[in-house]
Image (tube, rainbow, N blue to C red):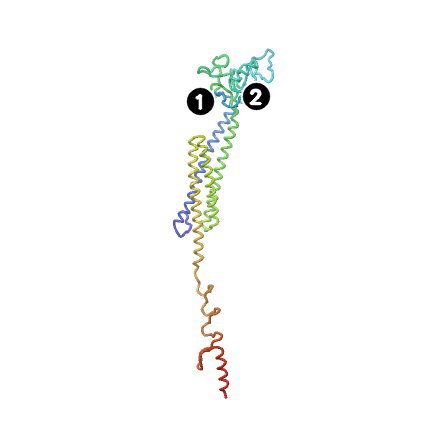
Amino acid sequence: MPNFNFPDQRDNKQANYLFAGRGCIICVSLLGFIPAGILWAASRETFAAAGTKKWFSMAEPQDATVFWGVCQTSMPAGGTCEKPSSSTTDKKKCLYPLSATQYSGGFKEYKQACVKKGLVPVIIEDEKQNNDVVLMLGENTPAWIGLEKTLGEWRLSGSGALPAYTNWHADEPNSGDGKDLKEDYAVVGMGNLKLLAGALFIGALVVCACALLTIIVVCVMCCIQYRALLNKNDGMLTCVSLCDACCGCLSCLGILAGVREAIAAGGSVSAITIIVRIICTVVLFGMAYIGWILKTKIICQRQGQQVAQPVILGQPVMGQPVMGQPVMGQPVTGQPIMGQHVKEERGQLSGPMDSVLLAIREKDSDP
């Protein structure tokens, strides 16, 4: 561990705790790449599902969602289908797309809409017809087809016969897998998953970018803090401590948002995220507190060094005279002061007037 030359070894330990805390933050940030990878893998699977031509079991929509549907009729004698219908590759059927604006509701309403047009729900008999249906729909999937679950078995709508051809997606049909809504109707394609796949991919990029940015910021702050402690720069250390405190406050807001999500979702993943955020928040506030304490001790140590500066012999200090040099108001030994005389053999030191009288007497006494 680095030694930052604090007089108290406990301060050196606290300084090293700062770097240990930043290492903890970096480790937690590295864990952020795990959910980013999960989201990326989910986006790939969703993209693949969005472009599939497979069938899926579906329940009646419980909201305003309306799927497209496909109706059919036999090929006319002239061998040409009326627009907007299109013929199948084998020239046996005319396929009519039923858009979501032409009816409202679920599978039952879809069947009624086909009957009103003199058509029936499409019956897909082979792979070529399946490709024709998907090609006609384009991105307007999922779309209802004439297949539903009756008396525990999947049968063709109208005739009730067992289908000769199916093209179910993996793990389909699942009939809801124990959900409250029973998925007793069939759709082809899942083009509406493209938006979800895009959202998952963007989410993966955001999570990855946040984790990478956090690591970079922590490393930069670690370098600044190291230089501040090594050079005893209290200003830089103050800035780093304030940054740690601000990050801790933002982490608190993240905890509140996570608690709200956990209450709404009730998932274990949300609970784990909250625990990790709490640990990061405690570490951030702890680093801010230790950095502030060390900053205060650096300032006190600097002030103590200024007060206790040693006096060098032979150099004057303000307010103290050097031996042999006069100071205003103080005589140097052996020199008289104005208004006083040195004691002589003929008399005692006296004031100025007595000196004048003594000089006159000496003058009168001279011959």
Where is residue 11? Give x, y as percent.
Answer: 40, 49
Q: Which residue lies furthest to the left in this view?
A: 9
Mark 1 highlights which residue? 180
Q: Which of 48 and 198 is in front in this view?
A: 198
Where is residue 256? Give x, y as percent.
Answer: 45, 36
Chain-order first, disc 1 or disc 2: 2
Which element carries disc 2, helix, strand or loop?
loop
Which element carries disc 1, helix, strand or loop?
loop
- Residue drawn 47% across the image and 77% down it: 351
Mark 2 highlights which residue? 101
Residue 260: quarter of image? top left
Residue count near mark 1 (Cα–Cα under 10 Å), binned few <14, some 14–19, many ≥20: few
Residue count near mark 2 (Cα–Cα under 10 Å), binned few <14, some 14–19, many ≥20: few
- Residue drawn 49% across the image and 75% down it: 339
Q: Which of 257 and 146 is in front in this view?
A: 257
Which mark is drawn over residue 63? none
